[in-house]
Image (cartoon, helix red, strand yellow):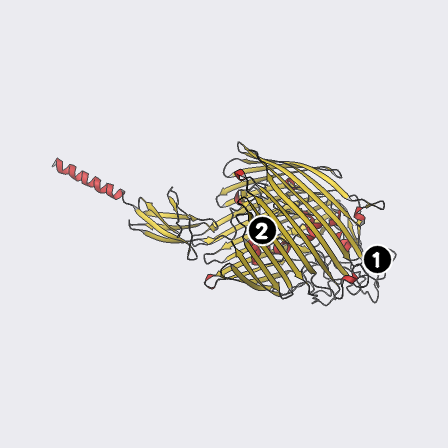
Amino acid sequence: MKILKKLLALFLCGLSFLATSQEYKLSGMVLDDNIPVPFANVLISGTTKGTATDENGRFTINLSSPGKYTILVSAIGFYKSTKTIEITHTNTNYITINLIEASEQLEEMVVTGTLKAVSRSESPVPVEVYSPTFLKQNPTANIFEALQNVNGVRPQINCNVCNTGDIHINGLEGPYTLVLIDGMPIVSGLSTVYGLSGIPNSLIEQIEIVKGPASSLYGSEAVGGLINIITKKNNTAPHLAIDGFATSWGEYNLDLATKINFGSKTNVLLGINYFNFSNRIDNNNDNFTDLTLQDRISVFQKWNFQRTNDRELSIAGRFFYEDRWGGELQWTPAFRSGDSIYGESIYTRRFELLGKYQLPIKEKMMLSFSYTDHDQNSVYGNSTYLAKQRIGFSQLTWNFDVKGHDFLIGSALRYNYYDDNTPATTFQNQNNADEVVIPSIFLQDEITFSEKHSLLLGMRYDYDKRHGAIYTPRTAYRWKMTANDILRLNVGTGFRVVNLFTEEHASLTGSRNVIIAEALKPEQSVNVNLNYLKKIYSNNGLFIGIDFSAFYTHFSNAIIPDYDTNPNQIIYDNLNGKSIAKGISTNLDFVFANGLKATLGTTFQDVSSTENGITKKQILTEKFSGTWNISYPIKTLNLGIDYTGNFYGPMRLPLLGENDPRRAYSPTWSIQNIQFTYDGIKNVELYGGVKNLLNWTPNRGNPFIIARANDPFDKNVTFDNNGNAQVTQDNPYGLTFDPTYVYAPNQGIRGFLGVRYRLD
């Protein structure tokens, strides 16, 4: 009997062993719209079990027991996905998991916020990233126009005739925005107005935007924010890319980009952009061109050299030439600088050189440099403007870690040369070119307390012989509350040394005289920015991204043009009071399982200045704005649809006095576009659509846009002894010629067609 009991016990133990040794198989496939996703990571939540899909998107995982499991799937270029399955038997359990292609990866590498390459979610400074896909959603001939669909960023046209402009960030005017190429300050002063164009989109890796002061790293002009255009490297650039489009208005744009290898360690990226518009269109019937005629070419070249230990060495250069004019329809170059037919003619020639060299030592030290040479020959009616600007910049940085501290130490030297034929560079009736060398040193320490908490401290010292020592500290705190929730608090300072061209440019068009009321001091600002970033992943494949910011900027010594004191003058002086910009901004990203993607953004802001107890709203600054980018692919038809647009709330406009019949405030207005893209041909995309669907132009509701367009030289204007225009029968409102009343493009609805060819 005892023997039988022992045998029975052994038998039962054997059954138990067999039961526990059984394997429960989970197999499946990871797909992107029925297309296999190879090498995706597949993990079992709460365990160490996982695998990767094979080249056909298939995977198998062996499990030791039945039960309910949550599967986590991730792949580069896709949003993460989760799926729950209950394992009940030992036979193969099969599932399919669909991934959604990411419209904007939150783990993209960014460099602008800290001068170091970090993932976007790990950066203590909020950085917005825009890829070439964003640029394709609304094709434009330059980056200036492309930024119209970035929330909180507005390209502002400053002249109805020459159509030059600048970039406003969070309501702050163009001189407060610094534009960089590959981290080097290329666009400032003269080139802020004319140079933000000409780099082929196919050579742009991404565009990074920082909203708020960044002078502690980048110095002057990085007061309101900065835009960094990052070009491609060898491994991401196409061998050949061609992109050309034309519009029903007669605009023609061609981008050509290629990659040339010289041996195994040297390659060259070459990009050429050509744009032409030669039609004289006057839909608002004021005898002035609605859109400036342009003939522009830009040649960009970047040399990349492969070195030992992957040290960086690159040199890039760009040549830019543009001939643009606007004015009365009968104008020809024969009338240039004359006083019979009005025209604004601008010849711009520009060279740029920039490079990076990582020192051949163990320490991470980088030497960067840039140089720009800008020559401008312009005529505004019978006023001639000849200007030369040279900016040289060099910077040496050293990055090293010490026990939870990530240090960045840098030294920079900036050379500015500016000369023109205006009173801006004239002293005691003698030409006096503005030439200054500004040395700088800066220190940054990013302290990592834990995986969730980090603190960035920074300080910069600049010395300008005209203004003395300038200090710009900043601090940034990042709290990664969860893997999908990040809170950032940034407090920073900014400064801007006076750029006489920027202050004086408005005088070159129209008849207003510029008055520099005093020796202008550098502007300084203090900014507080609170940013919250949240990612939501649902089980049905929906992704939601929330990016919320609140900002507050206080200016001292603000230089604000005074259009109100005297309608015939623009008075510049340092504000004896305060200037404040504050607001909130929200970006929402939606990605649906069916491929629909939407990015929606809104900004509410209040920008004002207070002097002598009187508060005024800033001219040409909208109270609220919004942008959207909506894309939907119909893959069965190889067709993509992009619907993009923006809207802007009322802004105060520069009138010429109480009798000026034009609107004092703009209405709420919107520019909307739609595009269809067909990619059913190998290496080819065909695209077309309609821009400005609502046919919005600022002449709606206005008796005219350009004041005294019939008398641009003010020959029939009567002035009193103080220089004020008088009301006469020929001049019932007492106005002078003025093309600066502009808040929106004069270009109405138009169709466009284009083709892209890309060979990787």
Name the N-terminal-most of marks 2 and 1. Answer: 2
Q: Secondary structure at mark 2?
A: strand
Image check: 306 left or right of 198? left
User: Can you tell which mark lies on residue 724?
Assistant: 1
Circle nearer the viewer, 2 or 1: 2
- Left or right relative to 236: residue 316: right
* Amino acid type indicated by mark 1: Asn
Looking at the image, the residue that sits furthest to the front is 263
In the figure, 299 relative to 678: above or below?
above
Q: Is 21 left or right of 543, judged from the image as shown?
A: left
SS at mark 1?
loop
List the residue tagged with mark 2. 204
Residue 404: image location, x then y, percent: 53, 33
Quadrant in which the N terminus is drawn: top left
Quadrant assignment, res 293: bottom right
> In the rendered view, would you say 177 is above or below 400?
below
Distance from disc 2 to disc 1, alpha carbons, whole Å, reads 50 Å
Of the residues shown, which amino acid type is indicated by label 2? Ile
Instruction: Report x, y in % for residue 2.
Output: 13, 35
Of residue 421 and residue 662, the one placed in the foreground of this image is 421
Residue density around tag 2, few if under 14, some if 14–19, many if 20 or more, within 10 Å: many
Q: Nearer the viewer, residue 560 or 359?
A: 359
